[in-house]
Amino acid sequence: MTTFEEVFGTAPDGAWRAPGRVNLIGEHTDYNDGLVLPIALPNRIVVTASARDDGIVAVSSNGQNGVIEFALDSLEPGSVGDWATYPAGMAWVLREAGYEIGGANLLVDSDLPTGAGLSSSAALLCATGVALLGLRDLEVDPAEVARLAQKAENQYVGAPVGLMDQMASMCCTAGHALYFDIRAMATEQIPFDPEADGLTLLVIDVKAPHRHVDGEYAARRKSCERAAAELGVPALRSITMDGLDEALAKLSDDVDRRRVRHVVTEIDRVEQAVALMRAGRLRDVGALFTASHVSMRDDFEITVPELDVAVDTALAAGAVGARMTGGGFGGCIIALVETAKADQTFAAIERAFGEHGFRAPTSLAATPSPGASKLD
């Protein structure tokens, strides 16, 4: 691994980290003003940094070759390409917001798998943000950094993402899930300790070619926005379970109808999951995981065969619940399993993937971890 000194010829001033996330439940609800329930992972992106006084930001990565430089004064959307678009976008949005960041050398390192639906892009934006702010001793509320990171991804990178990933990366705490109400911009830390119930949360990367095609993600979002406009509401969050059938009857397009049914029922499942977790009934949340997957498979149509096989196999092996997590079209599943059966559940998924000719899956530790911070 290349050291900071080898790349930049100087010692760093510090290092800052931001984690990836896995969403327990609440998929494609964030851009519908809905509810989500992510945890931060121990896997993270680390940005080691030093300040410089020439207004230049130089970025390098242990996963890429060379150093990419850009001038802060000339930043605008489209001016920096490749993976450096993300740190450039964060620098741009911080300056647009009036934060007096300066030039910097940034070395990016990561143990967070890319393309697995664990939000490596949001983690990179957040890690860059806390590093650039930290170099200048600028203290900014974590939720504000999250909002700026979302703006960078929307307006600079050009990806129409919601706010969940950035909030999870910035605001999660150890041993808790983040109950985030997007419409109210309110968060609550919900204790999440599967181990205390004899359970393990398996995160399985199905290694499918990540078909989270921007066009497909954008199409789902446009469908939701089109349906909300036809129903005369600001966002699908305004449709309640009691009013769902009436709302579906008003929609002219069957695809939009199915998208709406997923979003409204998924928001309800988040509320049910939080109520069960508050009541100490984590095992009962498993059925909601499974119902969520069925909804994403049939109504939102964002699963792929690898995800469906992994979920079906986990359930057949005795998981109390399993679902696809993330944006879809590849990525990961989560399975809530008896700790004593965790290894055999993963082994069953490995066998099933071999029988289907899929690439071998991998598993990740899913310990609820803290959000972004400076490393000691």
Image (cartoon, rainbow, N blue to C red):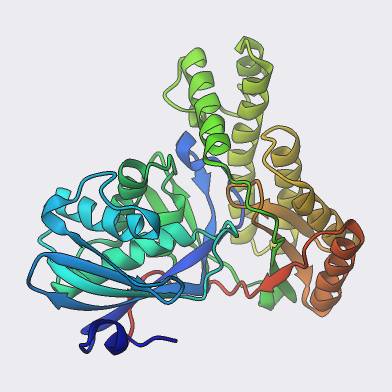
Single out the residue that lies furthest toward the left. Answer: 53
x, y percent for residue 204: 70, 65
Left or right: 329 in relation to 146: right
Left or right: 165 in relation to 347: left
Res. 318 in view: no
Taking the spot 44% from the left edge, 65% from the top edge, the residue there is 172
Res. 74 in view: yes
Total tally of numbered discs in the picture: 0
Taking the spot 58% from the left edge, 68% from the top edge, the residue there is 192
- Location of the N terminus by quadrant is bottom left
Q: Quick one: 111 or 31, which is closer to the camera?
A: 111
x, y percent for residue 300: 66, 34
Residue 255, quarter of picture = top right
Left or right: 352 in relation to 177: right
- Location of the C terminus by quadrant is bottom left
Taking the spot 88% from the left edge, 65% from the top edge, the residue there is 354
Q: Quick one: 244 or 86, which is closer to the camera?
A: 86
Q: Quick one: 272 or 141, which is closer to the camera?
A: 141
x, y percent for residue 180: 45, 51
Residue 48, quarter of picture = bottom left
As displayed, is residue 308 above or below residue 228?
Answer: below
